[in-house]
Amino acid sequence: MPALFPRWLEWFNQATNFLGCAFGYSAGLPVVEPERRSDTMKLYESLASEHVTELALRKPVLCTGDVTVRAAIQRMQAAKLGCAIIVDADHRPIGIFTESMLTQLLVNDPAAVDGPVSARMSEQCPVVHETNSVSRVLQALQRENTRFLAVVNHEGRVTGLTGQKGLMEYVADHFPQQVLVQRVGSPPPKEREGA
């Protein structure tokens, strides 16, 4: 695991806790310095007013339930994604299979990788609608305690994938002065501004 991951995860947890507080999803209230209040309000307004389609949506890995776990894993690896959305014939989500589920599967029943993914998926596939606000993504991530969300259209068909990464990229792109972003493999910045 890259050395930056624990720091990124710590930052993500702090950011989601702060954003959650700003939206009233936590009992605590954030302490915001007076000079940062206008930035916080801009962030709040953006999250509440912009649609999920403003996020950098990824092309999801879609599998039907009869696909083997092994085939789903290969598709996930090819797409460099940590999950596969299991869909019905109409591309409506019926479940999700994640890399953490794979880890548990390999520990408990490695032979099951040749069985159908429908037997190993979670039947609760967290979703957000294309027309939902970006703040709904934050709510869903916290409520579902997940990293991934399927994005569905008005017919309930999967059109994209978002989650923690999409939300953090949105915040970093829209509020670069408040967020220090370091791409994996890039040299560390010489000095840090902001938080």
Image: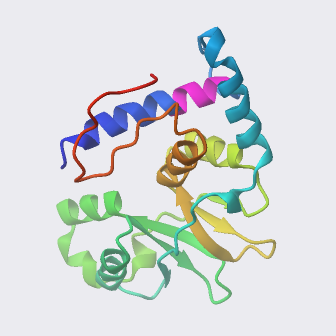
Write down the region rendered in magenta: 16-22
Residue 147 screen position, x and y as percent: 47, 51
Closer to the camera, 28 or 65? 28
Task: Say above or below: 124 vs 37.
Answer: below
Closer to the camera, 3 or 143? 3
Left or right of residue 115: residue 42? right
From the image, which quarter does the C terminus lie in? Answer: top left
Residue 183 screen position, x and y as percent: 33, 51
Q: Is residue 18 magenta?
A: yes
Residue 29 in view of the camera: no
At x 52%, y 39%, the residue is 176
At x 22%, y 53%, the residue is 185
> How many marks on residues?
0
Closer to the camera, 117 or 128? 128
Instruction: Give the main secondary structure, helix, strand or loop, of the magenta stretch.
Output: helix
Quarter of the view holding residue 191: top left
Residue 12 screen position, x and y as percent: 43, 36
Closer to the camera, 191 or 117? 191
Task: Say above or below: 144 vs 116.
Answer: above
Quarter of the view holding residue 181: top left
At x 69%, y 43%, the residue is 135
Q: Is residue 102 magenta?
A: no
Left or right of residue 89: residue 70? left
Task: Say above or below: 107 vs 78.
Answer: above
Residue 137 screen position, x and y as percent: 64, 49
